[in-house]
Amino acid sequence: MLVFAVTTARGPNWDHARGIREQPRWDEHAVFADMLVDRGVIILGGPVASDNDEDIALLAVEASDEHAVRSIFDADPWAVHQVFRIKHVRAWALWLDGRSRQAKPAARQEEAAQVIRPGPNVGTLPFRVPWSCRILVPWNRQLTPSGGRSSPLRVAAGGRSARG
């Protein structure tokens, strides 16, 4: 199955005096959307901020092709009653997807938020670096360009520095 980015927009029967959950047939639309989530058709989605006032939501939808996406939403009560419409359907190659990862234990999250404290000859970093991204070599004056080491330094197994 392919994944598509689907943008919905207000239809001719959108009531501009009401909020999204106050629109006609909200309950039926919500039941329909939940059913699509349960079937694995809608991967994720919800209201999206936009420069265009007509835009409502952005959805990640799994389907065989664009025609199938449009056919699926033809049965949505909001589409049937023209409260909303499908504005765009675009193929979307999801290269990054963190939903299948398990949350880190609290202790690991705290460790991941620690700030690197560089040595005296290294400037301070204005951002936090996750533990898994840190270099396993001490930050000290020996590693700076003026530190005097002429041979390359590499990280050996176990994270200990070794002369190359």
Image (cartoon, grey):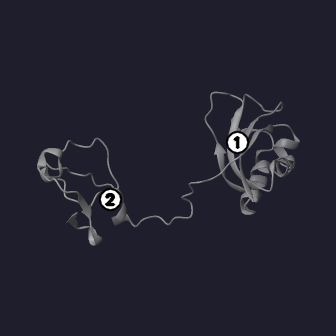
Residue depicted at 21% across the width and 66% down the height: 162
Residue situated in front as seen by the camera: 114 or 1: 1
User: Which badge, 1 or 2, is on the more N-terminal residue?
Assistant: 1
Q: Position of residue 6 (x, y in %)?
A: 72, 44
Question: Could you classify mark 1 by the number of other residues whose Cα lies within 10 Å: few (under 14), some (14-19), or many (20 or more)?
Answer: few
Based on the displayed image, in which of its 4 quarters is residue 51 positioned? top right
Q: Position of residue 79 (x, y in %)?
A: 84, 42
Furthest residue in direction bottom, as rendered = 158
Find out whether the residues at labels 1 and 2 contact each other: C-beta distance under 8 Å: no
The residue singled out by tag 2 in the image is 131
Question: Could you classify mark 2 by the number of other residues whose Cα lies within 10 Å: few (under 14), some (14-19), or many (20 or more)?
Answer: some
- The image shows residue 73, relative to residue 104, as above or below, that is above
Amino acid at the residue labelled 2: Trp
Rendered-image quadrant of the N terminus:
bottom right
The residue singled out by tag 1 in the image is 21
Numbered marks: total: 2
Residue situated in front as seen by the camera: 142 or 44: 142
Residue depicted at 75% across the width and 53% down the height: 33
Element type at mark 1: helix
Q: Position of residue 43 (x, y in %)?
A: 67, 56
Residue depicted at 19% across the width and 50% down the height: 118
The answer for how far apart the CA atoms under marks 1 and 2 are is: 42 Å
